[in-house]
Image (cartoon, rainbow, N blue to C red):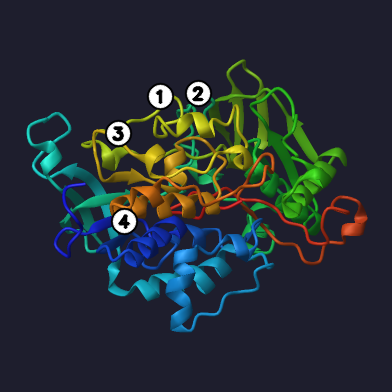
Amino acid sequence: MTGAPTPQHPVVVVGAGPTGLAAAAHLLERDLEVVVLERGEQAAAAVRSWGHVRLFSPWSELVDPAARRLLEPRGWTAPDPGGYPTGADWAARYLQPLADALGDRVRYGVTVTGVARRGRDRVVDAGREDEPFTVHARLADGTGSRLTAAAVVDASGTFSDPNPLGGDGYPADGEAEAASLLGHRVPDQGAPADVERHGGRRTAVVGAGHSALTAIVALTAIAEQVPGTEVVWVLRRGGVGNAFGGGDADELPARGALGQRARAAVESGRVEVVTGFRTAAVEQHDGTVTLVSEDGARVERLDRVVTLTGFRPNLAMLEEVRLDLDERLQAPVRLAPLIDPNVHSCGTVYPHGAAELAHPAEPGLYVVGMKSYGRAPTFLALTGFEQVRSVAAALAGDHEAAGRVELTLPETGVCGGAGLFDPDKDASGGCCAPVSPQTFQLVPLGQGAASAR
């Protein structure tokens, strides 16, 4: 970092989501000048977009300690620590109050378009380490702006960058042309618009994670309301395998309950399952679409396709800085081995901070939150809070605190994000008991978007 943050050269945090706002609270607590740039018109815009879902994590794991210390003297009352908020609850009862407490340090309607060293593109070596950062942005009225920063903390998340339908990481042939019939949003079984959109129609859910389970449970609930509703689950993997999670053994009871509900829906025959299917093309036929796999297999007569194949970091705004990224995950090189989804679940990820998140060629630049995980899916809100505690300490010059581990995670198996709450479901029906009397379904997180279990 080139000098201590000042009003002229603050720490710029990109994104007013759970991790970005927590970063600002930690920086403020250390008396560091901070500005948060948020492209939405309110805090936690991404969280609000899945406001109908309920998180796995209770309130006790969704409030950052520094944020709590900022809020409580202002009369904020913490929700019941054992309760499970929806995304809308999280935004309204914690994230927006936190942004309000930060005051005019949070600037809305500002889209960050680029980060660079002042007067230096990524090629130039001379004098680079002595220059502050320049943050380029586009304001709500379309005009350009720039801000000089002593350090940059990118907490913009991945929620706005879902992976495409195509099995090789690129859009399938015809995917763009069929966009009106495709989507990445988990249906809301309680929303009349979603019931109308999917009820009495044939919908494919593509993906093997908790988001896909969420959609399956939501769509089968819609099928109970509207006769003729069909659900097809399309997986790239060769079988369902462990997609249903830990069941009764899951240390997150709500997540285990979701897996059991999804399993029950599949085993009852209400869901058609197609495995080993990697989409190569999307064909349109008389208002419906057909998915065509790499080997020519076909899933036909689809009225809608819900693509839930994960997210990826958008690195376009960081093109002119020198990132040290893992070639596979697009996460910081020192972090990548700790989060590799082929090896780790979220509970086995070692808590990490500034040392693992740093980019040695760009002191003072950190990517945090879900975006720091690149393409790895197993991010926790608690992990993000620990990341920014450490980063704030490092930016304040407190390297002892930055290197200290202040978080212990239980080993909880495959991790997900959040889920719909079905308060009327009778757990005695066999799909959920004895895991929990409450049943939940999931939706993916990303952060600038929310990141939680």
The type of residue carrying mark 3 is Leu
The type of residue carrying mark 4 is Val
Q: Nearer the viewer, mark 2 or mark 3?
A: 3
Instruction: Using the numbered discs, state the Cα–Cα distance from disc 2 to disc 1 in whole angstroms.
Output: 16 Å
Residue, far top: 295
Any mark on residue 168, and which? 2
Instruction: Using the numbered discs, state the Cα–Cα distance from disc 4 to disc 2 in whole angstroms.
Output: 33 Å
Whether residues under marks 3 and 1 lie with C-beta atoms below 8 angstroms apart, the answer is: no
The type of residue carrying mark 2 is Asp
Relative to residue 375, is residue 348 drawn left or right?
right
Residue, far front: 400
Relative vertical location of residue 314 with respect to residue 68 in this rendering, above or below: above
Residue 389: give x, y in percent of width and height: 42, 55
Instruction: Using the numbered discs, state the Cα–Cα distance from disc 4 to disc 3 in whole angstroms.
Output: 17 Å
Residue 382: give x, y in percent of width and height: 54, 53
- Name the residue rendered at 44%, 56% in the picture: 19
Looking at the image, is mark 2 or mark 3 earlier in the sequence? 2
Q: Which residue is mark 3?
A: 323
Residue 184: give x, y in percent of width and height: 54, 45
Q: Which residue is mark 4?
A: 13
Give SS at disc 4: strand
Whether residues under marks 2 and 1 lie with C-beta atoms below 8 angstroms apart, the answer is: no
Residue 347 visible within the image: yes
Relative vertical location of residue 344 with respect to residue 354 in this rendering, above or below: above
Q: Which residue is mark 1?
A: 327
Whether residues under marks 2 and 3 lie with C-beta atoms below 8 angstroms apart, the answer is: no
Looking at the image, is mark 2 or mark 1 earlier in the sequence? 2
